[in-house]
Image (cartoon, rainbow, N blue to C red):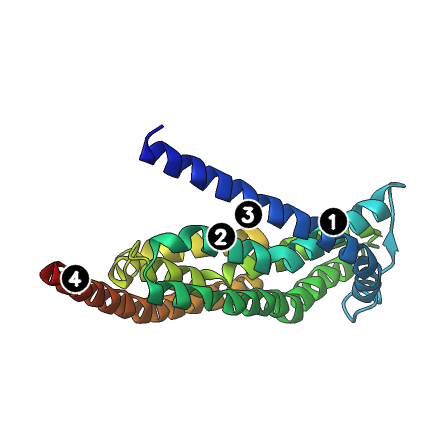
Amino acid sequence: MTEKDMTLVEHIGELRKRLTIIVVFFLLAVIVSFFLAQPLIQYLQFTDEAKNLTLNAFKITDPLKIYMQVMMILALFITSPVIMYHFWAFISPGLHDKERRATLSYIPFSLLLFVGGIAFSYLVLFPYVIGFMLNISDNLAIQETIGINEYFQFLFQITLPFGFIFQLPVLMLFLTRLGLITPMLMTKYRKYAYFILVVIAAFITPPDIISHLIVTLPLILLYEFSIVIAKVGYRKFLKAEQQQAIEDQQSLSEE
């Protein structure tokens, strides 16, 4: 077996080991989430947005379905630091020392941005959307009968995408530190990025201009902030590459 084959086998073995650790942590997180899901569901049922609504179960399995979905979401969130760490640990051998330290520090910021995205959508967008929908029903003299499954699916549809979208600055910083993209590239394709963000906003908001603007403007600002962050990361990438080139040259001269 060649050295290359051994390296490939070792990589596969390491990947399997890390995936096993992630699965074990996820199963433990599911057990923890089993006890957290009920109080969270009850809290969401009696917030200002939901307390005036009568939530109904149209299928006998609806409460169990919601319980399981909330459990899985909580378990994934609890496990996410472990997933990000092992992803970093798997690719870190290919990074310089400074890149390893820098990219490892992105993990807590990623979690904060995820929580920030969820908080923004739940505290700002979701109340407006619920109020908008109820006003339409009142104006049309329609008595709404709301299913608990439909309510929570709508809640997940509004809030969860923002948790992932708010990862954009960290993702751009990570990719620029690896030299995979540049802020110049992001600036060049800005108009295409704007179009994609507008389409995303259209998918996760009701068909009215106010809610669309409430979503689109923060997304555009987030992209512009990502460009600024990417410039910082790209400068550090160039500096690290120059430093590495100097060190390589010095090691060659010593030989």
Q: Position of residue 6 (x, y in %)?
A: 39, 35
**Image quadrant assignment for residue 50:** bottom right
Q: Position of residue 147 (x, y in %)?
A: 82, 50
Residue of label 2: 87
Identify the image quadrant of the C terminus: bottom left
Type of amino acid at the residue the image marks with label 4: Ser
Residue of label 4: 251
Which residue is drawn at the image coordinates 87% and 43% (left, top)?
58
Instruction: Characterize the local packing of mark 1: few (<14), some (14-19) or many (20 or more) Cα atoms within 10 angstroms.
Output: some
Type of amino acid at the residue the image marks with label 2: Phe
Compare marks 4 and 1 and give the one earlier in the sequence: 1
Which residue is drawn at the image coordinates 22% and 63% (left, top)?
244
**Alpha-carbon distance for marks 4 and 2?**
31 Å
Type of amino acid at the residue the image marks with label 1: Gln
- Between marks 1 and 3 in the image, the one whose residue lies nearer the viewer: 3
Compare marks 1 and 3 and give the one earlier in the sequence: 3
Callout 3–callout 2 Cβ contact below 8 Å: no
**Alpha-carbon distance for marks 3 and 2?**
8 Å
Q: Position of residue 203 (x, y in %)?
A: 55, 50
- Assign a secondary structure to mark 1: helix
Identify the image quadrant of the N terminus: top left
Residue of label 3: 18
Which residue is drawn at the image coordinates 50% and 39% (left, top)?
13
The answer to whether any part of residue 217 appears in the image is: no
Q: Residue furthest right?
A: 60
- Disc sitting over residue 22 in the figure: none
